[in-house]
Amino acid sequence: MSIPTTRILPIGAEAQPGGVHFRVWAPDSPTVSVELTNGRGEAQRTVPLSAEAGGYFFGWVEEATAGTRYRYRLASGSFPDPASRFQPDGPHGDSEVVDGRSFGWTDGAWRGREAREAVIYELHLGTFTPEGTWRSATAQLPELARLGITAIEIMPVAEFPGRFGWGYDGVYPFAPCRAYGRPEDARAFVDRAHSLGLMVVLDVVYNHLGPDGNFLRSYSNDYFSSRYTCEWGEALNFDGPNSGPVREFFVSNARYWIEEYHLDGLRLDATQQIFDASPKHVLIEIARTARQAGGERTLLLVAENESQDGRLVRSPERGGYGLDAVWNDDFHHSAMVAAVGRIETYYTDHRGLAQEFVSAFKYGYLYQGQWYQWQQKRRGRPALDLPPRSFVVYLQNHDQVANSLRGLRLHQQTSPGDFRALTAVLLLTPGIPMLFQGQEFAASTPFLYFADHSGELRKRVRSGREGFLAQFRTIACPENRELLQDPSAEATFSQCKLDLAERETHRPAYRMHEDLLRVRRENAAITDAARIDGAMLRDDAFVIRYFSKNGDDRLLVVNLGTDLFYAPVSEPLLAPLEDRGWSVCWSSESPDYGGAGTPPLETTAGWVIPGRAAVLLAPDENCELPSVRLTEKN
């Protein structure tokens, strides 16, 4: 049997006809062997690997097949494969060979979806269903598609220690976590999603690795950099000595998920903590390689970036990194201040005013280089040239829900009217809206931070979490300290599992989301507007006008305060099309959602805009205004 000369990826164990090809980067070890094990860490056969330039070792083993367990024997000991495709017994156990080409895909005609169609649904596999597996989540995909979701964003699944966790402390970026099932279950999830018209985007962490089960230093100290300080662990070496193989490791990981799992995109965690001063930032390589791996599929590459750097979504030709969109924390912060009223910590520079919402609709980020009081420095870079679909907007996500005393959802912290109105603002945005699991039916279950650690690490994680939340003066109150839950307690994790029966018991909220997503889908003026403009009507009320390419405009009127009697009507954005009037085509005050009903907004006495409400108006051939005599004063 001849040894193959080609591989799919440069690292890891690849099952091929007649055997398995192994390749690993271990420049700190003079010799490397692959140990075929019995699955309990005991070597049954040891095969020396051949050294090649740059610190790599490789070898062909005919006895190995898909399912074979193995470890690498270095001079310093025996360790799992850093590029392991599966860790069936967790991060400290043996690695398993996985045949990435054996799955029977049925999505050959799938080409993805355009960004203008994107409605993202962020979910955590362990809490999305009671079972917390790929298979149980797959069973829920038809309902998500029926609701109007078009893209599933899965929180990190890279192998992590313990029985449960958020996934941001993963230690094997190529290995889907055994807690959720096997690799073929993950592929089946993606294949089923594509059959329903759903994209699948994976949250990946390329800024650090977790502390438990991380054996990269056993292979090379050059995986990490001492030049930078990362908030959550050792910074990765993307620009220092011997950084080439480190870049290759993570760039290959992006290719792997797109190519072998048919994923439709990546959400890149905390990109401000990916440090790289080299001429070509590693994110440029990741984006280019992912698109090459996707072939004809339309991909969605999204960055989280606390620094709000607009370069991320510009093309490399324009000095950017070539991603598609960035998370917009500014939108979330303004909405939370408007809904809850508290201005503390990172909400300090937001007031929840109408101006902020109008600016977010028109320009995305609010902070694009202005002074930021909370950080005592300038925040953001210019982004005025970026189109609305460059921004992912949200009222809830995993971090923001958990960054409260009890992991409360927005509807539990504000009035029903404000919740409905802000939901409309979110789902009628010209950007890319994102829902967090359960938001669509006003889930009663919390979402807390959980991570199954033990010993000293458990104490450190709990202390660190308490320290982080202590920046919120309301959480730091003495009477609240005992309410903070232990992240490593199983009860903390289990109470976060969604109760999917609430789709029916909370039917008004669920129907509202369903209707809004239908309105968004059926109104090209919203998703593909020729122009967006807006104006304040009062500090807590504003109007957004979607100028349609075919003259079929839409008008979103939002009032987060008391009833507004707006006269004289001097705002030109309220003017109807010629020989037309305005009629209500959707209202957050529909009785179906628990509202009080919506009389006509435009009257002979001026505009009467209900409080705590959002109303979408469409052109109407009827120009006659209802005659109303108002005694109330604005």
Image: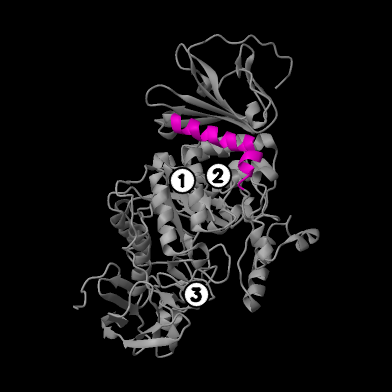
- In magenta stretch: residue 503: yes
Category of crowding for the residue at label 3, using alpha-carbon neighbours closer than 10 angstroms: few (below 14), some (14–19), many (at least 20): many
Dominant secondary structure (helix, strand or loop) of the stretch shown in magenta: helix
Q: Quadrant of the N terminus?
A: bottom left
Q: Which residues are magenta?
A: 500-522
The x and y percentages for residue 156 are 49, 61
- Identified by mark 2, the residue type is Phe
Q: Quadrant of residue 35?
A: bottom left
Give the SS element for disc 1: strand
Category of crowding for the residue at label 2, using alpha-carbon neighbours closer than 10 angstroms: few (below 14), some (14–19), many (at least 20): many
Category of crowding for the residue at label 1, using alpha-carbon neighbours closer than 10 angstroms: few (below 14), some (14–19), many (at least 20): many
**Residue named by callout 1:** 391
Label 1–label 2 contact, CB within 8 A = yes
Q: Quadrant of residue 473?
A: bottom right
Marks 1/2: CA–CA distance:
10 Å
Residue at the far left: name it.
2
Q: Which mark is residue 91?
A: 3
Q: Which mark is residue 331?
A: 2
* In-image side of 478 versus 165 (left or right): right
- Identified by mark 3, the residue type is Pro
The front one of 399 and 336 is 399
Give the SS element for disc 2: helix
- Identified by mark 1, the residue type is Phe
- Give the residue at x 33% y 57%: 104
